[in-house]
Image (cartoon, rainbow, N blue to C red):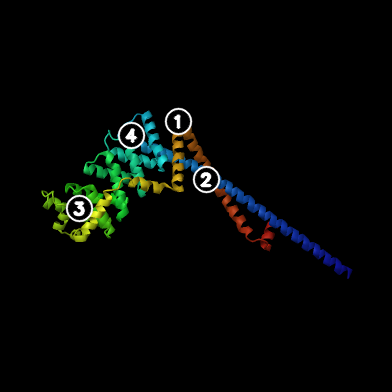
Amino acid sequence: RKATTQAEQAELRLAKQKDNLSKKNLSLRDSIVQATTKSWLYIKAISALTESFASGSKEAVNFQRDMSQVNTLTNFNKDDLKSYSKEVGNLGVEMGKMPSEMAKGMYTVQSIVDESADSMWVLREATKASIASNTGLSDTVDTGMGIINAYGFEISDLTRVYDTMFTTFDIGNVTMEELSQHLGNVVSSAVKAKVPFETFMGQLAFLTARGMKTAEATTALARGYDAIYEEYEHTSKISLVQKLRLQGRAGLKRTFMSQEAGEAQQAIDKVSNSLGKTETAYNNATDNISTEIAKTKASIVMDFNDMITSNETLIRFFIKLGKVVGIIATGIVEAFKTPIDLFFKLATFGQTTGFQDWLIK
């Protein structure tokens, strides 16, 4: 009986020791998980900082490269180019566009306007329209300036052109991107037939609101305008609706006959009264956190640009250093990836005998 009692006590002590060992194993497992998790987070933080540094410096270098392209048209000396570049980039910071895109937009502006034009004002107006319409800046410049040049408008009429376009987008079913793609189909015909810009845009809004695709509408209008020019070139007193009614081709007769002619005129009247439409659309499009983030990103790039222009040798060193740190961080991640994954997998076994045996051994 005494031997049995001693055996039971020994068994209890063994069980208690086993339980203590199990708790220590779990504690060790938790420590391993915490240590590896912290290490992983530190590595990811280093990697993120390195990536941010490399990204900012790369964008700044791209901006300088794109402004050098602009200078093929402006022929500034080095100091003037630095000042001009800063002005272009800071406009991007103010409005929420990356400096490199602003530089590309300025290239398009400079390739279209003459030397007497206020290129910065043109870029500002085009940037508003670009952001408000969610369209690339270069395409927006092309579209607006395409109308200016085709109709022989003054550069100062660009705001009115964009205002008219935004009313067209509002009451019709057409976007800036679609207009930039298909404007060439019709604008020369409209100008040749002496169709006012607001009339053309009002009719485009009317047709697209009725279900016509932008490509189809611009093609139909171009055919109608060409017919007007060919058949009624000398009857300038006849109204456009009358000319289209007389011409009576492919859908245009149905579109501008009877009551539809009145509805089309209403669309024309609306787009003719579009003052401030672009500004309103821009304000609505930028009243959000996303714009503030975009401005911050643009500001960071311009900070890097200032660093580069102030000390090119030093910034080149930092760029190289950033690459080296990136390589090291990547190497550390790869070196620790396998054991870290292994620890996390083992941790999922919890209190199983297999995990405890492995840990003890």
Q: Residue at 58% across / 46% down in the picture? A: 42
Mark 4 or 3: in front is 3
Q: CA distance from mark 1 to mark 3?
A: 54 Å
The answer to whether residue 1 is visible is yes
Q: Amino acid at mark 3?
A: Ala
Q: Which disc, if any, is residue 273?
A: none
Disc 1 secondary structure class: helix
Mark 3 or mark 4, which is nearer the start of the sequence?
4
Q: Amino acid at mark 1?
A: Ser
Q: Is residue 274 left or right of residue 293?
A: left
- The residue where tag 3 is placed is 222
- The residue where tag 2 is placed is 48
In this view, the residue in front, 4 or 51, is: 51
| Callout 1–callout 3 Cβ contact below 8 Å | no
Q: Residue at 61% across / 51% down in the picture? A: 37
Q: Which disc, if any, is residue 71?
A: 4
Q: CA distance from mark 2 to mark 4?
A: 34 Å
Mark 1 surroundings within 10 Å by alpha-carbon count, few (fewer than 14), some (14 through 19), many (20 or more): few
Mark 4 surroundings within 10 Å by alpha-carbon count, few (fewer than 14), some (14 through 19), many (20 or more): some
Relative to 75, is 148 above or below?
Answer: below
Mark 3 or mark 1, which is nearer the start of the sequence?
3
In this view, the residue in front, 32 or 120, is: 120
Mark 3 or 2: in front is 3
Disc 2 secondary structure class: helix
Q: Is residue 112 left or right of residue 300?
A: left
Mark 4 or mark 1, which is nearer the start of the sequence?
4
Q: CA distance from mark 1 to mark 4?
A: 20 Å
Q: Amino acid at mark 2?
A: Ala
